[in-house]
Amino acid sequence: MKRLRLVVVGAGVVGFSTAVCIAEALPLCSVTLLSEKFSPDTTSDGAAGILFAAEFPDVPLERQRRWFKDSFDHLLAIAQSQHAPDAGVMLSSGCQIFKEVPANKTPFWSDLVIGFRIMADGELKRFPDHKFGQAFTSIKCECSSYLPWLEKRFREAGGQVEQRKVNSLQELSDGFDLIVNCSGLGSKELVGDAGVYPVRGQVLQVEAPWLNHFIRDGDGKTYIYPGIHSVTIGGTRQEGDWRLHVDKGDTQNILERCARLEPSLKKAKVLSEWVGLRPSRRNPRVERERVQLQGCMVPVVHNYGHGGWGVTIAWGTALDALELVRKCIQEMPQKAKL
Amino acid sequence: MQAEWEELARRNWLEESDSQQKPIPPSVSPGYYFSTTNPFRDQPNAFIEGQEKARQGDLNAAVLLLEAAILQDPNDAEAWQMLGTTQAENENEQAAIASLQRCLELRPNNLQALMALAVSFTNSGLLREACDALRRWIRHNHRYRHLVQDSRGPTSPLQDVLLLFQEAALLNVDGVDPDLQTGLGVLYNLSSEFDKAVEAFSAALSVRPQDYLLWNRLGATLANGNRSQEAVEAYSRALELQPGFIRSRYNLGISCINLGAHREAVSNFLTALNQQRRSQSCSQQQMSANIWAALRIAISMMDRPELFQAANMGDLDLLMAAFQVGDL
């Protein structure tokens, strides 16, 4: 008998999270994930993957809190399970420090992470340029492990994976009844969204096993994130910059800025350099529409534009996308019987 | 998850759920699940009485009597055929398909069973199987069998059979063959050429204006071609001719949903479920899962959470009282 055929476009953390949510919740749909690139070649693979967030301007705060909480709880459960090493998910403690005291000292996610507190003056002494700090325990989710782990989970739920570049939604209307778009920056071409733009990020992997705590400058440009195998240090935030090659000037700059926060990094060996383009948008697009494809109205659920917060809210937005998929199914025209 | 399951079942993306019914006795026909308790098990003249109940529109009683007839004589092809068409009218497609297939094993040239099977396959989205049944219908029909050629070159199975039926129609210069037109209507449904399918069923109805099955097929075709308003008229005609026609009432409910008339949709689904239940000694298991699922959809659109809960619990009496649906 015919089954409802769903396709998810995109194999980054948003694409695979969404595909897993759908395949596990709707076991009687056939779900296919199509993508030009897979781990380790996605933007998610280079992300440090530490969970905290900035506020999107036009998304109700309650919804942003839910995205954050659903993702945090989901990853926390993995971090505290036997799957932690395979999935590349770990707890990580540290601080975010500010040169000027921010208007909002307790961000919306402060009660969703573990043990959030304002840092004491004594703790801030080691950062002479900074006046204010927040200390908390969050989660680090390393996509080079997490994406293959999600892919396995997706396949176990009956999902199919295919490497293929999708140039237009028209290509998909023949084989699929419902399209889920998680193509990130690709949405610029795929659905003609002029609101998506790259924010270039360059990071380095360094060997510094003596570091256990993360440090992030509140401006989002300088950070040190100890991980399972190495320490990710960064970074850059270059809006509209499409360059995917490593910039030696950026590398030098990153090393200097990070060493100012953590002088011991001068002793660290640089293991690799990496550039990624954050799929940015004023607000993430998590909504559905109906698109006319080859004479048929096909439901499309969008889930893209997470910027630098893909790992942070992927699972939460994936659950929203699942709800949207459910609504689409409910509204599909019902067939009369001869 | 159960909700999704039924959701999909309702749309034919899955086989309908027969899970509540336990198969007995599997040796008679591997594909058909008989009712576990059948008060007519040893009834004499079960076939004749079943046929009469079906004519009266008491489809559940008809099903039980026909099952009894088959348990008494498993090789009664006519009873299998009647059971198949009755199950289709009672909105149980899987049971219809299994019965009709058994009938055709016993009598491969039964034209009515072939046509009914083609319709059931079409409803189930099984294009190849539907085309195959219609090709067999032509091959066993003495008026048209000479048209069948071994090879027509590389065409699709649908185009292949459609050509056969079109050629056959050209032979009928002096009148309309309503059965041939029915086949054409089914084929045009398969190719989504709904306007042509409407013409074919209308042609068949010009010869058999009292055929409620044809009125329902015309209605379903109109509905699937986005002509719900006209579909309602066709279903209403079918139900005037046969008030117990569960499938047509289910279809009418679906069209009401599509027209935004949720209360009318609920009312039709409740009537259909009550008709399925009403037959003596019939328990809940005789009610179609897909009618319940459609009922839940309609109620969910009315913003009445307490009634939605009742629908989830399968509380037909509470819902009938709430919507003031009485016995027909």
Image (cartoon, grey):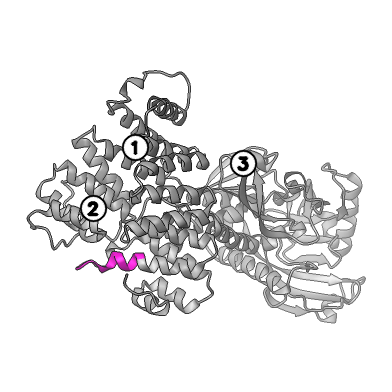
Q: Which label is found at residue B179?
A: 1
Among the 4 quarters of the image, the one containing residue B143 = top left
Q: Quadrant of the N terminus of chain A?
A: top left
Q: Nearer the viewer, residue B228 or A44?
A: B228
Q: SS for tag 1?
A: helix
Amino acid at circle 3: Leu
Where residue B173 appears, as percent x and y from the top left, is 39, 27
Are callouts 3 and 2 both on one chain?
A: no
Cα distance, mark 3 to mark 2?
39 Å
| Neighbourhood count class around disc 3 (C-alpha, 10 Å): few under 14, some 14–19, many 20 upward | some
- Residue B207 lies left or right of residue A312; in this view the side is left
Are callouts 2 and 1 both on one chain?
A: yes
From the image, give the main secondary structure of the stretch colored magenta: helix
Q: Chain of mark 1?
A: B
Where residue B72 appears, as percent x and y from the top left, is 9, 50
Cα distance, mark 3 to mark 1?
38 Å
Residue located at (26% from left, 58% from top):
B59
Q: Is residue A295 above or below residue A119?
A: above
Task: Nearest to the eye among marks 2 and 1: give it.
Answer: 1
According to the picture, the residue beneath numbered tag 2 turns out to be: B33
- Residue B268 lies left or right of residue B51; in this view the side is right
Cα distance, mark 2 to mark 1?
30 Å
| Neighbourhood count class around disc 1 (C-alpha, 10 Å): few under 14, some 14–19, many 20 upward | some
* Viewer can see residue B124: no
Q: Magenta span covers which residues?
A: B272-282
- Residue B143 lies left or right of residue A131; in this view the side is left
Where residue B47 appears, as percent x and y from the top left, is 14, 51
Q: Which label is found at residue A172?
A: 3
Q: Is residue A65 above or below residue B246?
A: below
Residue A209 lies in the magenta stretch: no
Where residue A219 appears, as percent x and y from the top left, is 86, 65
